[in-house]
Amino acid sequence: MTDGGGPRVPEVHAAFLRSAVARLSEDPRLVGVAAGGSYVTRTMDEFSDLDLLVAAEPEAYPSVLADRQRIAGDLGNLLSAFTGEHVGEPRVLICLYGPGPLHVDLKFVSLSDVAVRVEDPAILWERDGRLREALAGGSPRFPPPDRQWIEDRFWVWVHYGATKIGRGELFEAHDFLAFLRAQVLGPLALHLRGERPSGVRRLELAAPDLAEQMRSTLAGYDAGSCAVALNAAAEIYRKLRGAPGGGSLVRREAAEERP
């Protein structure tokens, strides 16, 4: 269905939004609710989560933050919730609601901080136009991959991965290959295609040809397969590193030749 004239939203998601926005608007400490993520990119499907920004009066923000578990519990049948320190965002409450189940991220922010953001969210409700006004105080910016930062580290990382394979620590080798995909190859590939460089998120849809190449970095549970995958990751990095628009880059050739 189409929710509020916005993008097409699965009914489970739309029903939660209708109920949650109505409940949140009753809290006098709050000044607005907005949706981000796949809602604004119009890529929602039945597997999507909901990314909601909940803006509070600056003076009420400490009490809202302290009360966020109760607020989340009032929005539906809350099965479990925890804060997002593991992704560097303690303001986010990561929630699972039933009986869907439905994954909802509630990001509680002070109205004075909403101008600093990575995307323009879709406003679902606001008090007296104040959320829109606050958003107008800044522009969205998702940081691009820092190519020099990556180059300075990449070949040391490759050596580290090779030692794990040589020692037979294959689970660690698999974790390392996933790290390279999420922190290096995926962001560079997505950025090259003009997409948000967020790990390997939706890589198959945004850059299917590059995703197909990246299949070669998937290893089996044996040292030989892991070594082949690591070499493939290095070759893909070389191609992405030299892609147009990369700017000047000081290549760490001595480290690159060593592995």
Image: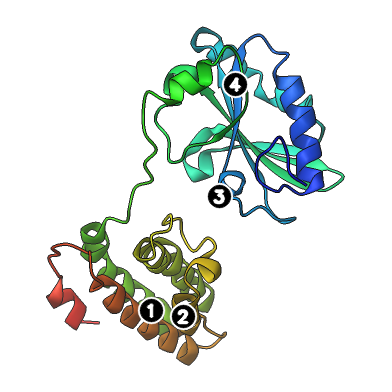
How many angstroms separate mark 1 from mark 4 (CA)? 44 Å
What amino acid type should be assigned to the residue bearing mark 2? Thr
Quick one: label 2, few (<14), some, or many (20+) residues within 10 Å?
many
**Label 3 CA crowd tier, 10 Å (few <14, some 14–19, many 20+):** few
Asked which secondary structure carries label 4, the reply is strand
Real-space Cα separation, disc 4 to disc 2, in angstroms? 44 Å
Which disc number belongs to residue 32? Answer: 4
Decide which of tag 4 and tag 2 comes sooner along the chain. 4
Q: Which residue is mark 3?
A: 41
Discs 3/4, front: 3
Asked if residue 242 lies left or right of residue 176, the reply is left
In the displayed structure image, the side of residue 249 where residue 128 appears, left or right: right
Q: Could you say which disc has been placed on residue 217 in the image?
A: 2
Q: Position of residue 209 (x, y in %)?
A: 46, 79
Corner quadrant of residue 165: bottom left
- Residue 200: where, in percent of width, then height? 49, 64
For disc 1, the neighbor class at 10 Å (few under 14, some 14 to 19, many from 20) is many
Secondary element at tag 3: helix
Q: From where the camera sits, is residue 60 visible? A: yes
Residue at image mark 1: 233
Q: Amino acid at mark 3?
A: Thr
First along the sequence among labels 1 and 4? 4
Q: Residue at x 68, y 38 (%)?
A: 5
Disc 1 marks a residue whose amino acid type is Ala
Q: Amino acid at mark 4?
A: Gly
Q: Is residue 188 above or below residue 235?
A: above
**Residue at left 68%, top 40%?**
104
Secondary structure of the residue carrying numbered label 2 = helix
